[in-house]
Amino acid sequence: MPEPLPTATAFAEISPGIFRWAAFSPFHRVELSSQAVLTDAGLIIFDPIPLLESGTFPDRKFAGRASLVLTNGNHERAAAEWQRGWGIPPESQTPHLFPPELAVAEWTDRDGWRAVPLPGGAPGETVFLHEGLSLGVFGDAVVNLPDRGLELLPDKYCNDPVALRTSLAGLPTFERAVFAHGQPLLSGASAKIAALL
């Protein structure tokens, strides 16, 4: 039986072309956050949870140019629903980032995006960077929960905490970051993450 997922009741455009929706999951005991990023190449939907649409999200004219991306192997969430709802062909999504090498190869320099594996985190953990937007999209490696603030994935959930820290230390500079769990950082993101290492 699939794990129950909360439904977000609204989305917000947190920065031009960057959309976020979130809801607290009693089952997971944490906030689940999802993002969508609109670029000239189309709409990329990351780690989606259900969203109760009260309007157009963000604009159905992008339905033919949307794709799904999961930041690690644990974040399938409601990807199948979003795929059906937006008419996204299966080949345009990365279902589990397994094997990670294949997913990274597919996403290297794709429409301004670069996939960077983060060994040591959750299975298949990958951060997606967009240099033009100065944006990092994180899964579980870094979270920014309302009640705890910015922190690295706790060691007990890591495959190798030292390897994860080393992976994060090698990331380039970016101004903004969004997370699969918690609030976005809209300025100085990479410096704030580096301070945790």
Image (cartoon, rainbow, N blue to C red):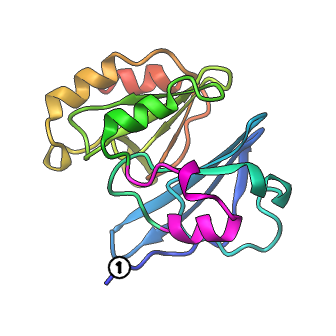
Q: Residue furthest bottom?
A: 1
Q: Eyeballing the image, is 30 above or below 54?
A: above
Q: Quadrant of residue 54?
A: bottom right
Relative to 94, say whether 163 is above or below: above
Q: Let me know if residue 94 is in the magenta part.
A: yes
Apparent side of residue 164 relative to residue 114 in the rendered image (left or right):
left
Image quarter (top left, top right, bottom left or bottom right) of the N terminus? bottom left
Q: Nearer the viewer, residue 186 or 62?
A: 62
Which residue is located at x 62 percent, y 58 percent? 89
Whether residue 10 is visible here, answered yes or no, is no
**Residue 12, image x, y percentages:** 72, 55
Which residue in the protein does label 1 denote?
2
Image position, residue 140 (x, y; %): 35, 46
Q: Is residue 6 left or right of residue 65?
A: left
Circle 1 sits in a helix, a strand or a loop, which is it? loop
Q: Residue at x 55, y 42 (%)?
A: 184
Highlighted magenta segment, given as a residue range: 78-96
Which of the 4 quarters of the picture holds residue 120? top left
Percent across and percent down for residue 36 are 64, 49
User: Label 1 is placed on what type of residue?
Assistant: Pro
Q: Badge 1 local density, few (<14 within 10 Å), some, or many (20+)?
A: few
On the question of residue 99 being in view, the answer is yes
The quarter of the displayed image where residue 87 is located:
bottom right
* Rendering coords of residue 23 (x, y %): 52, 67
Q: In percent of the image, x 67 and y 26: which residue is there?
A: 133
Going by the image, does 13 lie left or right of 2? right
